[in-house]
Image: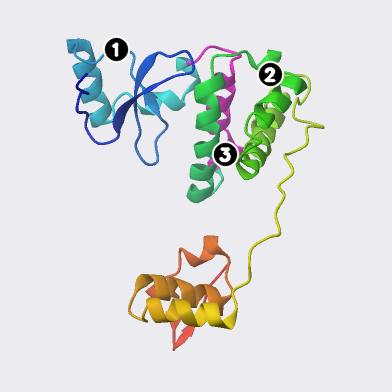
């Protein structure tokens, strides 16, 4: 079957029930799920509205979700002072995790979520311990928010342990490995620049990616963490 060509950011996938769904993604916006089927006039109108940005923004609001659902809680959290006060990079990180969880469990009532459910959700991702633990850490935030907002009387993430990540840690490069990297990537390459900054500036990655010419002053690098 010939697949339909969609604009950039729009595509189709099969959900957990085997149903083909159409969704759209745009940097800085929540994932949008189309309500109509491709090939219809209604879909074309919905697509034009998404491209124009007139129907995606309300997806963050609580008016488009069922009151008391997981999706309702996440939408309400997005509108909270706690979330709004975060840095833009942190917001994107949070949304990348919560939107995937929302996609799978958004229609379920938040009051019905139990500790054993959280354990099962985390255990389902046991083959990727880092992802499982990131999800658990992220779930703790809206669940505490739910308790504060009176949407729940308890926090179902309390007492749930993360997945043990069996690792020896990150390998520390030897002088020979550093020399080999420098041979492959000469000073004028971006890879060498990133490597040198990481090796000699001693900054966190989150600070390093924001560094630029504005941080060079009088021949020195000045960074505010």
Q: Disc number at residue 36?
A: 1
Q: Position of residue 162 (x, y in %)?
A: 74, 39
Quadrant for the C terminus in the image: bottom right
Mark closer to the observer (1, 3)? 1
For the point 68% across and 18% down, the residue is: 151
Hey, which quadrant is residue 189 in on the image? bottom left
Q: Position of residue 197 (x, y in %)?
A: 49, 75
Q: Secondary structure at mark 1?
A: loop
Label 3 crowding class (10 Å Cα cut-off): few <14, some 14-19, many 20+? some
Q: Which is nearer the N-term, disc 1 or disc 3? A: 1
Q: Which is nearer the N-term, disc 2 or disc 3? A: 3
Mark closer to the observer (1, 2)? 1
Label 1 with label 3: CB-CB less than 8 Å: no
Q: Disc number at residue 151?
A: 2
Hey, which quadrant is residue 183 in on the image? bottom left
Say which residue label 3 marks.
83
Viewer-nearest residue: 127 or 186: 127
For the point 59% across and 20% down, the residue is: 70
Q: Secondary structure at mark 2?
A: loop
- Which residue is outermost to the right? 159
> In this picture, which residue range is highlighted in magenta?
65-84
Q: Is residue 49 located in the magenta-colored stretch of the structure?
A: no
CA distance for labels 1 and 3: 31 Å
Q: Is residue 137 left or right of residue 76?
A: right
- Which residue is outermost to the bottom? 219
């Amino acid at each position: 079957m010939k697949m339909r060509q969609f604009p950039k950011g729009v595509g189709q996938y099969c959900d957990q029930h085997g149903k083909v769904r159409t969704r759209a993604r745009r940097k800085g916006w929540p994932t949008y799920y189309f309500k109509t089927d491709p090939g219809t006039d209604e879909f074309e109108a919905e697509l034009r509205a998404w491209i124009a940005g007139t129907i995606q923004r309300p997806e963050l609001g609580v008016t488009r979700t069922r009151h008391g659902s997981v999706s309702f809680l996440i939408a309400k959290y997005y509108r909270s002072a706690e979330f709004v006060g975060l840095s833009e990079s942190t917001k994107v990180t949070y949304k990348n995790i919560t939107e995937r969880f929302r996609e799978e469990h958004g229609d379920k009532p938040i009051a019905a979520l139990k500790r054993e459910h959280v354990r099962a959700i985390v255990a389902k991702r046991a083959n990727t311990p880092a992802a499982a633990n990131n999800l658990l850490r992220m779930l703790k935030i809206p669940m505490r928010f739910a308790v504060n907002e009176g949407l729940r009387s308890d926090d179902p993430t309390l007492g749930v342990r993360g997945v043990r990540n069996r690792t020896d840690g990150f390998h520390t490069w030897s002088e020979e490995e550093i020399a080999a990297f420098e041979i492959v990537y000469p000073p004028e390459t971006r890879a060498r620049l990133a490597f040198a900054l990481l090796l000699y500036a001693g900054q966190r990655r989150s600070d390093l990616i924001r560094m630029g010419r504005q941080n060079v002053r009088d021949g020195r690098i000045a960074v505010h963490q």
